[in-house]
Structures are given as structure tokens and as C-alpha cells.
Amino acid sequence: MCGICGEVVFGDDLANTARVDRMARAMAARGPDAMGVSMRGRVAFGHRRLKIIDLSDKGAQPMTDMSLGLSLVFNGCIYNYQDLRTELQAKGHSFVSTSDTEVILKAWAQWGADCFSRFHGMFAVAIHEHDSGRLHLARDRFGIKPLYYSEAGGRLAFASSLPALLAGGDIDTSIDRIALNHYMSWHAVVPAPHTILKGVRKLPAATVRTIDKNGAFKDVTYWEPRFEKSSEDLNRSADEWRDMVLDGLRTAVRRRMVADVPVGVLLSGGVDSSLIVGLLAEEGQKDLATFSIGFEEANGEKGDEFVYSDLIAERYGTDHKKIFIPSSELQGNLPGAIKAMSEPMVSYDNIGFYLLSREVSKYIKVVQSGQGADEVFAGYHWYPKMVGANTPSAAYRDAFFDRSNQAMNEAISPEYQCDRDESLAFVEQHFARPGADDPVDKALRLDTNVMLVDDPVKRVDNHSMAWGLEARVPFLDHELVELAGRIPAEHKLAQGGKGVLKEAARLVVPAEVIDRPKGYFPVPALKYIQGSYLDMVRDTLTNESARSRGLFQEAYLDKLFKDPTKYITKLRGSELWQAALLEMWLQAQEV
């Protein structure tokens, strides 16, 4: 797990190593163990290293194999690298390191872009072919590892984080109106390739982009979740699905134990993270480190779920640490959490993951986390509302979106408005694709391909890597996701959602954590904005920087300032926090 960056010039000039050096230094937190910058004419690579596999300098990056004519920078982890290494050795390849990075180099030489379909893991990769001059950029199936880029003046720069690109310079920082529309309506989900800044784009998940010397490029999507069901799938019993899911999850958790350092678990006390702990215990992992976080209550809403995480920790005898964050510490750490975001994200989980990762990184470098289970196994409240929907896109919008297009235009200034509801248009287009006929499957496919990429997994990557912590997500094992796509919706929607997963969990963890109400990282102070928090967001939205940008209409902001607790979105979010967070992020990035 690391940070990567680079620049490629479309012409005869040399790459700007000073720019790459600035980008690499801006990602020090992602890779505190080492840094490297290399240049080969018109291509320069930069890397920040977090040592997880092959702790020696032989695993350092950028990595070059002169005999193959290839250079590479890589962020992530290939869980099946040892099996691939054995296969490549049988084909005549030799290795000088024990790293998964070198396996990628040899795999590209052997199979080309087909190598990515062979990888089990999370990754963002840049590969330079010395002879042809081509640059290949690739991202894992779920976009767990980020990859941003910017093209201007005959040069393309890329990096693991958007702030790193800004540190490199020469970026158009004006606001992208389409991205703003998505941010304000789709709960801050901004689908690739857009970001909130016009000058920065992101590579879609499961994509390989090949860029020629002249800048022409071609994208290939190498994987997408499937939702077709065979007659055997449709007739399979609930018990059969339960057992298949449990077997698949066991494999996924086992794969993510690969490391040359200890692996812990972020334990919320919900069914997903509790199941991971239980399966690791089954695998015989001793003295497993687990971590939970809680916040001060506000407006009568409790801010922790320690009762459930304690139950699991005691059941499996883990080395458990609870982190309690008082309101004063929460507010003091908000600027750091916001600055660590590659894009503005409104979910309260952000500050939770940021502070939890800070504490966890004091003890270990790698954790497993439960993200993805709700999107893969239908745990959210909008999936039941999709059943039998005559107009699935409208049903999805009505259950999920924060505001209508009319409300959008009442909130944001006219110069930032779009001619149509961009988020609804995106959903309609996505739902119209073949391969998912059931409205529930349409929503699951969209959330797995898009929402998951640009909310939960981005949130985990940004805030864990802000403290040099690698987070692995077994529920996003692609074989497990493919299995889930074959399961009829009725089994996933049972028991209020995630029915088949809950039944699998009953064979491993106590019923108390399975049958509890659905939980989340509760941060009441950011939902019910009062006192010093209200002063903070008012100052942010009315200072000189915000006024000169003019994103929001004054009447809209005045309404929110007058009664912040009145304006709560369908996803239990504060409209005022949503507006303030965007402006805080822009100011934190000095945009």
C-alpha cells in the first residue's frame, strides 16, 4: 500500500521531475517508509512506500526491469502474488525480490493487459514500455485504490490523491458543474471520470488505459459484475446459498491475511466486521488486534456502539482497543480529516475513519474492514423499495437522492446550475444497460460499480492512508461479488436486508450482533449542528473565500443557519453540513 505519481510528456521534451517530486512529497502519509523518483526521458515516476510485503529494499519503487524494457509504480496488494510467481517461474521468469510489485512486472510481460484479470487484489498501476513509449494505467475492479490524472499543455500527470496533483501544479481548479450536481443530489457520489475540479479526472474502476506517445488513448473495461441467473441458481435453496456465501467469504478473508506484518480488524460491532473477526479466529489467528471508536452523544442520540464490539472482542479473546472521542477533540481534528480527502465526502464516517485510523496506526499497519457488504448483499433501505418498481430509476432517486432538481436550483447559484438533473440522467443510463433485469439488481449493479467506488471505499482509502494504514476489504473479493450477483434478490432482501449474509453469520457469530438494528458510525455533533459547530460552518460559508466563489444562494444558507436540525436528508445527513463540507474542502486545498 503506497502512493504513486508521475508525468508523461506527449512530445520530445523531458518529464518534469521537480513536479513529480512535489507530488510524491505531498503523499508522505501514504508511504512513510521510503520515497523514490525516477525519469526515463519523457516519462517520470514517483512513489511513496508503506512496507507490507518484502520489507527489504529489493521491493522498492519505481521498479525497472531492463531485460523486459518495463518500469512500474504500483499501489495496493496482489493477494495471489505467490501463486502467480510460481506460475511465472515455470514459464521462465526469474525474480530478484519477494514482492508482489515484481510479480506485476513479469505478469505484464507474460500476459499484457490480460494480467489484471488474473489478479486477486486492490491496485492502481502505471507501466511504461520503454521501446514503444506507451504508458498503461490500470485500476482494480472496485476502484479500491484511487488514480487521479490531469492533462494540460501536452503533459499528463497522475497521482494516488487529488491533493498530490494540486501540489504538482498546473491544474485547472475551477468548479465542474456536473460534479457539483452529483455532489449535491447523490450524497456526494461523483462518478468517474468527473471530480469537483474541471482540471482533474479519475480513471474508472476495472479499467486499463493505454496511452500512446502522441497522447491518444484507449480504455478497456476488463471486469464488471454480472447478475444473470441460471435455472439452477433460481432453484437453489436458501441453505445452499448460505453455505456458498460462507465458503466464499472464508476464502476472501484468508486471502487478505497475506502480509509480512500483523493484520488487525476495524470492529464496529456490526454483523460485517464481527463476521470477519469470527472467520479470522476460525483460521487460527491468535492475539488478533481489534479496534472500535465512539463519539460524544448530541441531541439525545448515542455516539457509540461499544456494547456490540465488546461482545465480539470478549467472545473471540481479541486484543481490543476502544477509542472514545469527545466533542472538543472531534472538532479540532475536522480540518485534518477534510484536508485528507481526495474529494469532498459528506458521510459522518469520514471523521470516524480518520481518527480510528490514527489510533490503529500506532499499533499495526494492516487491517481488514467490513465495507462493501451492504452494496453486495443488499443491506440498504432503498433496495426493498426497488421491488417491482415500474420506473426503477425514479424509485432509486426517491429513496436515495438528497434533493430534487428544483431544490438543487434553489440551493446553488445560477452560474453553477445544469440544464438537467445529471444524477438522474446517469442512473437512467446505467439502469438501461443489459445484464440486470430485476430492478433490485439494477440498483445493486449501480451501487457496486459506482456508488461503492466513490463513497465507501474512497472514504476508507483516504482516511486510513492519511496515517499510513492499509485497509483490506474482503467483501469486495471479486469472486464473492460474482457469487452474490447470482443470488436471487429475495434471499438478499430477507430479514430486513443482507438475509443470506446474516444466515451465514449465524454459523459463526452471536445472534445479538446479527439481529440488532442496522448501525453506522454515529457522529451526532455533525448531524445536529449546534453551538461551536454552527459557528464554524457559518464562518466557513460566509468568509471572503466562500463569498467570492459564490456556490450557494444566500437565501438557502440563511434558511439552514436559522434551523440546522430541521433540514436532514433522506440518508440522515445535514444539508448544512453538506454545503459547509464542500466549502471547507475547497478552502483546505487552497482552491
Image (cartoon, helix red, strand yellow):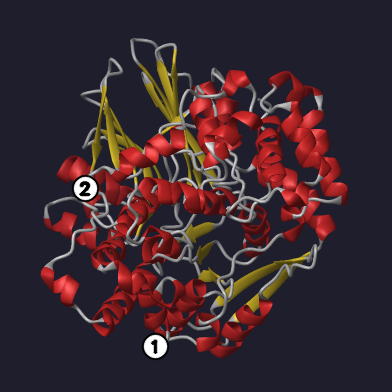
Q: Nearer the viewer, mark 1 or mark 2?
A: 1
Specify the farthest residue to the front.
390
Which residue is at the front of the view, 158 or 523? 523
Q: Is residue 141 above or below residue 254?
A: above
- In the rendered image, which quarter contains the C terminus? top right
Left or right of residue 180: residue 251: left
The image position of residue 90, as x and y in percent, is: 13, 58
Q: Badge 2, how many Cα within 10 Å: few under 14, some, many 20+?
A: some
SS assignment at label 1: loop
The image position of residue 471, as x and y in percent, is: 50, 59
* Separation of residues labelled 1 and 2 (CA atoms): 36 Å
Mark linked to residue 507: 1
SS assignment at label 2: helix
Q: Residue at x 49, y 28 (%)?
A: 178
Q: Amino acid at mark 2?
A: Cys
Residue 333 visible in the displayed image = no
Residue designated by label 2: 115
Q: Residue at x 82, y 37 (%)?
A: 538
Of callouts 1 and 2, the N-terminal one: 2
Location of residue 480 by image quarter: bottom left
Which residue is at the front of the view, 436 or 273? 436
The image position of residue 118, as x and y in percent, is: 22, 54
Q: Is residue 79 above or below residue 451?
A: below
Left or right of residue 110: residue 256: right
Mark linked to residue 564: none
Which residue is at the front of the view, 514 or 172? 514
The image position of residue 359, as x and y in percent, is: 68, 63
Q: Amino acid at mark 1?
A: Leu
Q: Residue at x 31, y 18 (%)?
A: 215
